[in-house]
Image (spheres, grey):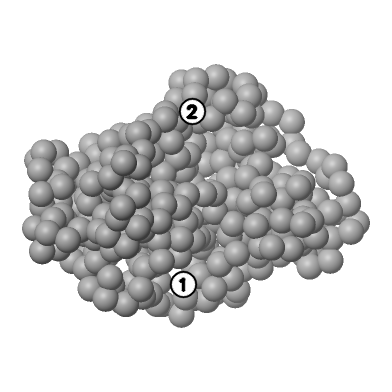
Amino acid sequence: MKALVYNGPGKKEWKEVPQPKINKPTDVIVKITNTTICGTDLHILKGDVPAVTQGRVLGHEGVGVVDEVGAAVKNFKKGDKVLISCITSCGSCKNCKRQLYSHCDDGGWILGHLIDGTQAEYVCIPHADNSLYPIPDGADEEALVMLSDILPTGFEIGVLAGRVKPGDTVAIVGAGPIGMASLLTAQFYSPSKIIMLDTDVNRLEVSKTFGATDVINVADGNAIEQVLKLTDGIGVDVAIEAVGIPATFELCQKTVAAGGNIANVGVHGKSVELHIEELWIKNINISMGLVNTNTTSLLMKTVQSGKLGASKLITHHFALDDIISAYDVFGNAAKEKALKVILKAS
């Protein structure tokens, strides 16, 4: 089969690799029908995730059809259409019992990280009964790809961890896919303002159509002043960091109000400066983490009902074997006006 292989920082290749096999009776082999590229994949290619070794098949999102089933799998059979979760969970360890699936003793974020992932024609999914979701009949399978990672990530690590509540003012720093996912799901809680901050003019304009009440171009150089002006000098109740660089975390620290919450969603490859000398007296809560995907079923219902427009996040389509071109587009998002790309297998 063909797959996208990581060959070290800055190096990737679409090449022939061995087709995965059932390793344990709880495994399932899925034939990929739709997958995508994540900002985390770009971080991997920059060398920000050293646990990813050369030769790894990348990708942790997608939908597909069950091709082979391990003897102990109870919930799925060959031919079932399934959504692949970016988080693998055994369902029985101590952390899984706490719904801390991202820290499963025999799973967590392993796809495209510690084991071969979904940017391939076939993928092996461990602990399939707890790591796959059946796709309802008639579902928009491309839209459901957004449920593998970005929507639960934006919702759980941004909105829920940030404690968004009715009437809040929310700043989302970064209008990429994760920021947009946070924007869409924050609206479940009716905040009074959602301020999107980015340097990409196109993404800021798109965010208005997704529900942002205000947008700020950080390239103008006075983002902090603009946020304070929009909040009567108080700052925001919730600042969601959705990029993963020191400057954006700094912006969240400078714009959060007393009693507010900073929810860090971005993947950071470098250390940041924490202004504890300023924040301690402001009663600030800071959260961060890896998605647990314990809201995937809830989000699937909202997508199916039409209440959550997941398909709006998709801007480009490619054939799976044209994945190198897709990476070029996704990696030049501002120029290409790209959010999420869909890679469709033939």
Q: Position of residue 211 (x, y in %)?
A: 25, 67
Q: Nearer the viewer, residue 336 or 43?
A: 43
The quarter of the picture where residue 186 lies is bottom left
Residue 185, can we see it? yes
> Distance from label 2 to label 1 (Cα)?
32 Å
Q: Nearer the viewer, residue 213 or 328?
A: 213
- Tell me if residue 150 comes above or below residue 305 in the rendering: above
Q: Which residue in the protein does label 2 denote?
A: 48
Q: Position of residue 232 (x, y in %)?
A: 10, 64
Q: Which mark is residue 257?
A: none
Nearest-to-viewer mark from 2 and 1 = 2
At a point 76% along the width and 60% down the height, the residue shown is: 91
Indicate left or right for 119 with 36 as reference. Answer: right
Q: Secondary structure at mark 1?
A: helix
Q: Is residue 340 visible?
A: no
Q: Which mark is residue 303?
A: 1
**Which residue is at the front of the view, 213 or 235?**
235
The residue sitting at the bottom extreme is 305
Q: Is residue 201 above or below residue 79?
A: above
Q: Position of residue 79 (x, y in %)?
A: 73, 62
